[in-house]
Image (cartoon, rainbow, N blue to C red):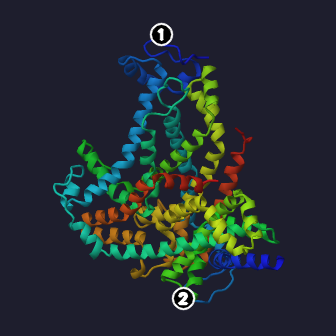
Amino acid sequence: MQHGKYRFIVGFLVVPMTLYVIFVIWPFIQSIYYSFTDWTGLSPDFKMVGFDNYTKMLDDDVFWKSLQHSVLLAVLLPLVTLGLALFFAFMLNVGGRRRKGAAISGVRGSGFYKIAYFFPQVLSIAIVAILFQFAFDPAQGMINGTLKAVGFNDVPDWLGDPQLALWVIMAVLVWCTTGFFVVLFSAGMASIPKDFYEAALLDGASRFTTFFRITLPLLWDTVQSGWVYMGILALGAEGFAIVHIMSVGPGGPDYSTTVLPLYVYQSAFRDGQAGYATTIGVALLLVTLAFAAIVMRVGRRERLEF
Amino acid sequence: MKTTDTPPSGPSGTPSDADAAKVPAQRTGTVSKGSSAPVKSSEGHVLNVFSHGMLILWAIMVVLPLFWAVMSSFKTDSDIFNTPWSLPSSLNFDSWGRAWSQAHMSEYFLNTILVVGGSLVGTLVLGSMAAYVLARFEFPGNRFIYFLFVGGMSFPIMLALVPLFYVMDNMGLLNTIHGLIAVYIAYSLPFTVFFLTSFFRTLPTSVAEASIIDGASHTRTFFQVMLPMAKPGLISVGIFNFLGQWNQYMLPTVLNTDPEKRVLAQGLVELAASQGYKGDYSGLFAGLVIAMLPVLAAYIIFQRQVVSGLTAGALK
């Protein structure tokens, strides 16, 4: 029996573990090692160079720029997205006209809104990026076309303007992620007992007080994990994809939209500096872990049970 | 203190204390809107108008770009630029045909279906096997393996991709469909194992014990008893993985550079670049809409499952 049990455990774990170790764990370990070498990625020869890559990185203006952009995305993007989503979710669930017998109610058609808002979430980030690249096209895009039609002739160059490009990209990310959190927070709000709201309303609390004193504290866990999730997205795959597809270059005029994952990619596969690229990757890992730790630390509150 | 339910004495119910400072904008709107209609509770009404306005605005902002893309795919190129907001004069399917055959959208589609089909099945089978063992059996190293899997969720994939490229190259897996499938599975495992482990823990143990007592092997118990019981969890995590893998961009960009093997996301980016040079914008929009349609259709049909699958899946 006991023998059969271990054979079963090993049999079930061996394939997933093998795949996972070969394609995920082993490359991670290797990348730390490569960050101390001068490997180009093109030839099999390389030698250890100690901390040379790290000192080079600290002197690299492009690295600092992309770090700044990545951190900006990781902090500001969740703030705007989650703020908007909380607002919309509260409107959908509590913002409605008070009906007879119910202390609180959502607006009419909240089901429809949730379906519509969620739409962008199922679309590929590539589709979203291409769509908005054309919408923001300075000469022929829908946005400048509309601006000109209503009388603005001095239209901006959006993605071609180093001052604007990153903000445009951020706006597109807000566009495609807000709906998901609206639905998520709505589900959370729906599970808050109705008598909490009834009691608050009897005590004369306004809806705004209700939101900050009841809804937000009870939803805090979800908001916090949403923050971490958004931040990791912005620092990782999603941030890479949207900048790689949308921004001119890619990386924007004067590196104005370069983010860390894009810089890792370009150093490794465009500039032939695989060793240096993994060094930037290690920095990216540290930023990601620090980000998650800070959010968890700052956001820690007493857990509310209901 | 403020009584929300009493009818206001002033035209809009004078806002008192803290609220006035917090929401001046909304309150100003009250005066005109609130007095024009008979109201029982002015705050509820104002909020209703205000919230409806904001909600409708966002709904328009979400739907409009998609609507613009669909409309543009039927138009001629000059119409797209000259009259971006008018309806197409006739339903022109030429650009759809061009995108489907000449721009290789059909091949990208097939590649994507192969890759996602293979990796989705693989992810679910391997992920549930690992999760089942980790959730239900005590053995040395259980915790370690669990955290090894789960830790992968917070690592930035980009860091591993550089060495992974050369690992794949050495194994002859670069630019192959099966190589891509293996990588998709490996990178989907952390979340899948994490989600399904907690799911298997919630299932009652008595059923599995009964089937073991009846003489079924562990393997048989898993496939014939536990997996069917885990169906809701498998559906949730399956939808999550399906969308993630279907929409994957970073992994194929790095590991799959052969034009013949491109998946949909890569193909679209390629199409955007080449059609941009050629000036075939209607072809590009048709390509975008072709890529959007299956997911959109699936979302509309399985809307409830998709939403619950993703929200149950993404955060826990």
The chain under label 2 reads B
- Relative to the observer, which residue lies in front, A241 or A215? A215
Is any atom of residue B280 visible in this view? no
- Relative to the observer, which residue lies in front, A52 or B45? B45
Q: Is residue A229 left or right of residue B97?
A: right
The chain under label 1 reads B
Is any atom of residue A158 visible in this view? yes
Above or below B54: residue B249: below
Question: Tag 2's secondary structure?
Answer: loop
Tell me the CA gap for discs 1 and 2. Answer: 80 Å
Question: Tag 1's secondary structure?
Answer: loop
Q: Which mark is residue A128?
A: none
- Relative to the observer, which residue lies in front, A2 or B225? B225
Decide which of tag 1 and tag 2 comes sooner along the chain.
1
Q: Is residue B162 left or right of residue B260?
A: right
- Extreme residue toward the front, this view: B214
Please report the residue visible at 57 percent of the width from the left and 39 percent of the height from the top.
Answer: A190
Residue B230, x across and y down, in percent: 63, 62
Classify 10 Å Cα crowding around label 2: few (below 14), some (14-19), many (20 and above): few
Q: Quadrant of residue A260?
A: bottom right
Above or below B56: residue B137: below
Q: Which mark is residue B9?
A: 1
Residue kind at label 2, given as amino acid type: Gly
Q: Which mark is residue B172?
A: 2
Indicate the quadrant containing the N terminus of chain B: top left, top right, bottom left or bottom right. Answer: top right
Residue B76, x across and y down, in percent: 19, 61
